[in-house]
Image (cartoon, rainbow, N blue to C red):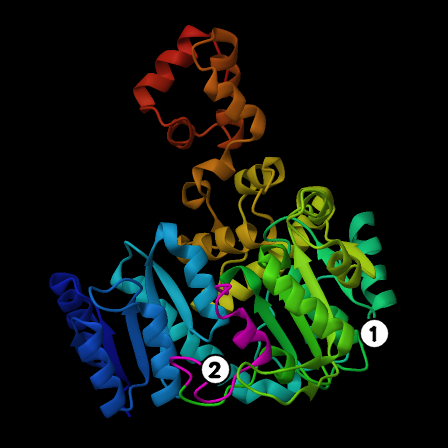
Amino acid sequence: MTQQIHIVEDDVAFGKMLTSFLERKGFAVSVSLTGKNARKAIAENNFDLLITDLHLPDDSGLDLLEFSQKVSPKTKVILMTGYAEVDTAVKAIKKGALDYISKPFRPEELLMVIEAESRELKTKLKSKSEKENDDSVAHENDFKSTDNFQSKPNFVVGISESSKKFNEYLKLVGPTDMCVLIQGESGTGKEVAAKAIHNYSKRKDKNFVAVDCGAIPKEIAASEFFGHVKGSFTGAVNDKKGHFEAADGGTLFLDEVGNLSYENQIQLLRALQERRIKPVGSNAEIDVDVRILSATNEDLQKAVSEGKFREDLYHRLNEFSIHIPSLHERKEDLFLFIEYFLAEANNSLGKDVIGLSKEVEEAFKNYSWPGNLRELKNVIKRSVLLTNSQFIPLEVIPREVILSENSKRSQMDFSRESNEKQLILNALKAADFNKTKAAKLLNITRKTLYNKIEQYQIEL
């Protein structure tokens, strides 16, 4: 049966280009230029896939995502975003979007996303029982809210000392009911650590509910956490179950908890102390049995001293603390993660890339990975998409990854002769003395590179 795709895009030319391309690939495609027309089309049809821009003249992709989930829950949604909107797109993934793709992109890239998700779904349905035994080797950044929780966590254990200590803490605190504060840099996999704790606990067969506290406006936080009854405020057209009630018997994970307003902190503290909640607009209280895990990349102790975070709430949340090491702190594990992300990208994109070229290996080892596992995963997936050989070549790697910190510092002081010579030597070494590749790394012409080599009498 032909797949039905609906595109929501106010750029007429771009929409026509995508339509023409996808129709040539055998899809049935329709287009809406506005959110209003899109909502009407979604309500009247059973689309297999909705592809929507994040920003529309009269609507937003996130609102269309929520609307589609209500009126057509079987319709999958892909968001088209600008590069600066990736954080918003990630939030959309948490809300149930299938995937996102950053503009500008080629139609072939969109097709790869569509086909990869289709293959992945078929694979999951076919080998669900077989994969249960293999899940123990998965990585620290790939849990989703729809996963079936296993008795063991789903991540690369690692061989570095910091990873071993981190994993020992997860196993130690998991079986308890202690509140755990998970701290670490952005991109280290704090939600995955929380799920690992949940999977080690007696609550593993109950719900794990993740909440991004930074994405909840303070005006509706009480409704989000505790629910509301119909008619309690403008827009409350139905009763709504809050996160606490949804996680009853299981685990509630509060990500970026430091972003909660002071008023919301008071409400949260009361719920933790009394283990009872009152939905907005209701006179009845509800008993809840919830384990609280929270995470932050901020210094909450500093926030407490500055009066921005309640000290009593901080101590409630911090019965036990765990620090997730950054990727820079556990470089011994780097290639374990690369191996996993490579296999994942191959499976997702339908590729068969074996590994990294020697130049790329060297560049990866020299890079500090400030974005941690999230950055590594994105770089690997992008590189696999652009690779047409067995090994990922240097040309497809982002420039900031290729040059080491030392090379970057040298490049910033390019006017100084010694630094310029060293930068050229570093680039030549990274490119295995391929002058064309080295010139690309340095962002200069090949002729200029030859002149510099002669100027500094560099022997090759």
Q: What stretch of residues is rendered in magenta?
A: 216-236
In the rendered image, the vertical position of residue 79 relative to residue 443, given as above or below? below
In the rendered image, the vertical position of residue 231 relative to residue 60, given as above or below? below
Q: Which residue is drawn at 58% across and 86% down?
A: 127
Report whether 375 appears left or right of 130: left
Give the secondary structure at mark 2.
Answer: helix
The quadrant in which residue 147 appears is bottom right
Q: Main secondary structure of the magenta part?
A: loop
Report whether 258 appears left or right of 386: right
Q: On the image, numbered disc 2 is attached to which residue?
A: 121
Q: Does the magenta stretch include residue 141?
A: no
In the rendered image, the vertical position of residue 268 relative to residue 323, given as above or below? below
Q: What residue type is labelled 1?
A: Asp
Report whether 150 appears left or right of 51: right
Q: Residue furthest front?
A: 283
Q: State how far apart marks 1 and 2 are (Cα).
A: 35 Å
Answer few, some or many: residues within 10 Å of disc 1's Cα (few below 14, many 20 plus, some between 14 and 19): some
Q: On the image, numbered disc 1 is attached to which residue?
A: 177
| Closer to the camera in the image, 68 or 46 | 68
Tell us which disc is closer to us: 1 or 2: 1
Give the secondary structure at mark 1.
Answer: loop
Q: Residue 110: x, y in percent?
A: 32, 66
Q: Residue at x 55, y 59 (%)?
A: 342
Q: Residue 250: x, y in percent?
A: 72, 81
Q: Does the magenta stretch include residue 221?
A: yes
